[in-house]
Image (cartoon, rainbow, N blue to C red):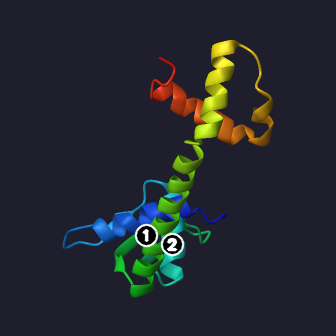
Amino acid sequence: MKRDNNVRLLVLRKVRDHEGAEPLQIYEDLVEVRNAARLIREGFIEGEVVENGSGMPVNAIVCELTDSGHDLLEQLEAQQLAAEGQKKGAARDPELMRLLLRQAAYGKAEAGLVQWNDENIHSNCDVLLTENYTK
């Protein structure tokens, strides 16, 4: 199974935010169960893994994050914030926005657009459309 940091972050947050005397049981979403089982086995969560006859995890009974689990959660949250910041930064390139607006206004391709990749162009177009820059 491929390690999915988004699911790991979701599971770690669920465990951290769980309030109650009873342990939290993760069993509905198989991807969450497998990631919770891996986090338990890697020592990030205190808990128990329930397996079926084939040895596949079908339930994860989790109690709390270990110290290293809290560290991993902080690390994954920091990575997520950094990635969101990069996306927002890339989505607001003033020079690219100026060229896109000129292209929209005059109906012809701007030569300067070749220096940006498609992802930057699309994200800047999204900003222009969602924030009403074209009015």
Tell me the tag on residue 37: 2
Q: Secondary structure at mark 1?
A: strand
- Please state which of residues 117 and 56 is positioned toward the viewer in this rendering: 117
Check disc 1: other Cα within 10 Å, few if <14, some if 14-19, many if 20+.
many
Label 2 near label 1: C-beta < 8 Å? yes
Check disc 2: other Cα within 10 Å, few if <14, some if 14-19, many if 20+.
many
Q: Secondary structure at mark 2?
A: helix
Relative to 127, say whether 56 is above or below.
below
Relative to 57, say whether 128 is above or below.
above
Q: Quadrant of residue 17?
A: bottom left
Considering only order in the chain, which callout, 2 or 1, is on the residue closer to the N terminus?
2
In this picture, residue 63 sits left or right of residue 48: left
Q: Residue at x 60, y 30 (%)?
A: 125
Tell me the tag on residue 60: 1
Question: Residue 77: x percent and y percent?
Answer: 45, 66
Q: Residue at x 43, y 69 (%)?
A: 60
The residues bearing labels 1 and 2 have C-alpha atoms spaced at a distance of 6 Å
